[in-house]
Image: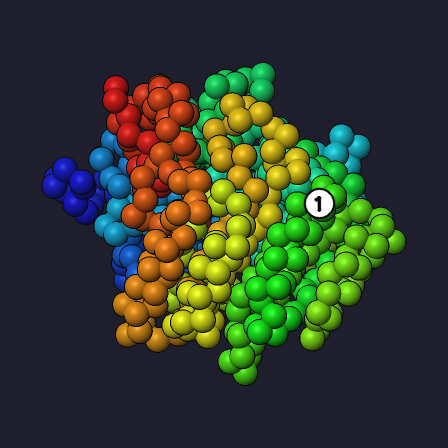
Amino acid sequence: METITGTVVDEAVIEEFETGLRGRMLRPGDEGYDLARRHYNALIDKHPAMIVQCAGVADVVAAVNFARTHRLLVAVRGGGHNVAGRALVDSGMVIDLSHMKGIRVDPTRRTIRAEGGVTWGELDRETQAFGLATTGGLVSTTGIAGFTLGGGLGWLMRKYGLACDNLLSVDLVTADGQFITASADEHPELFWGLRGAGPNFGVATSFEYRLHPVGPVLAGRLIYPCAQAKEVFQVFREYSQAAPDELTATFGLRSSPDGMPMAAIVLCYSGPIEAGEAVVQPLRRFGPPIADLVRPMAYREVQMLIDPFYPSGLCQYWKSNFLQGLGDDAIDTILAHFATVSSPLTAVVIEHLAGAVRRVGPDETAFGHREAAYDLLITSLWTDPTESEQHIQWTREFWEAMQPFSTGGTYVNYLDEGRAADAAYGAAKYERLVALKNRYDPTNVFRLNVNIQPTA
């Protein structure tokens, strides 16, 4: 096997490494290799030299040490949901945590400890057995690891903060193969960096979160004809600015199954159902909507609301930016570009932030951009790979047209391969992150991420 320096790792050395694993190592030609390298995004087609399916922390330590010693490119896979494909690598090593599924809820302390291969659907199943939850991904198959290390926008964020705001500690294997726990009391500076720029500093093997009482929520979609989209958009803007923290809502544009463009407001009210009904009533009166799918439901159900729109196996290309606001010019630009949408599977989503997201101090975590009120996400999806160029071009042109309304910042979990790290972390925090990178990964072992370049 060839390394990034052009040298070749002896086969006997590889076999010795494999023998020492409790988990399984897959190489090209092995049974299960093609399944293990398959990605959520059909555009991603990478061929790792080895996929180390770790059974526990000892396997992670062994894999990190082997990769560092032999100068292998390393990708780390948790849920494998990152649309840019950072969980895989050509020719190098994938440290695959997807078989590490340990979860333990402490209902008395209202905390949970979960390993790095757990998805949000799996975590929610365990916490909801006790009527508890924490802010998680909008798609249930998303892994907790990358999502949390990048910040974590979700349905509970306006009431309880981001996923990283609910993080109590992280177990981490660093680039030199050391196992450490980072928290507010242990390695606090590293803990700061892990909450927003985490993939740069090591392999996170488990996470401890704070939990909150979350019973049935009022959630679902209000669907309007696209002819009313501008009025709905303006109502969403005014409504969201006055909404209580219990309500998290998004505005979306997408085509119906029969190809008709539609506008929708998707919401989750995480408070008493009766109070939520009163909060939602103005949206129900407006229009009125052609479909009102808002109803009381279990939190696990709301976490799967948009799963059908983002299935595995489709071609995907995303672009995103935080927005300064939603003025009429921004709304007109969004609607004009969506009118030319190149795929009926593509969606444009405006996520409303603020609330508890903004009440965390701007320097308390590496995650930045807390001043933004909205996030724009353009998710282009299609089935035929031969159409990729036209769909990617449409997405890029749309994103470029929105730059006058952007804060210049991007949510790291939505960041495509073409953007600089300071768009995700912010220039003001970058120097502090470089200092952490110099300390914990001075040779940039963990570089297949939104990378912070070490200077050591």
Quarter in which the C terminus is drawn: top left
Q: What's the coloring here? A: rainbow
Closer to us: 445 or 381: 381
Closer to us: 56 or 307: 307
Left or right of residue 297: residue 3: left
Closer to us: 408 or 21: 408
Q: Residue at x 62, y 52 (%)?
A: 237
Q: Is residue 270 visible?
A: yes
Find residue 311 and report its horizontal and vertical position in percent.
Answer: 50, 66
Q: Which residue is mark 1?
A: 242
Left or right of residue 245: residue 165: left
Residue farthest along the bottom direction in this orientation = 258
Residue farthest along the left direction in this orientation = 6
Find residue 434 and report its horizontal and vertical position in percent.
Answer: 34, 24
Q: Residue at x 44, y 59 (%)?
A: 333
Q: Residue at x 34, y 65 (%)?
A: 394
Find residue 83 and report its horizontal and vertical position in percent.
Answer: 41, 55
Residue farthest along the right direction in this orientation = 274
Tally of marks = 1
**Label 1: element kind:** loop
Q: Dot 1: within a 10 Å radius of its alpha carbon, few (fewer than 14), some, or many (20 or more) residues?
A: few
Q: Is residue 99 visible?
A: no
Left or right of residue 279: residue 28: left
Find residue 50 and report its horizontal and vertical position in percent.
Answer: 30, 49
Relative to 46, say whether 188 is above or below: above
Q: Residue at x 29, y 48 (%)?
A: 418
- Looking at the rendered structure, the kind of residue marked 1 is Ala
Relative to 258, say whether 135 is above or below: above
Please tell me in which quadrant of the rendered image residue 199 appears. top left
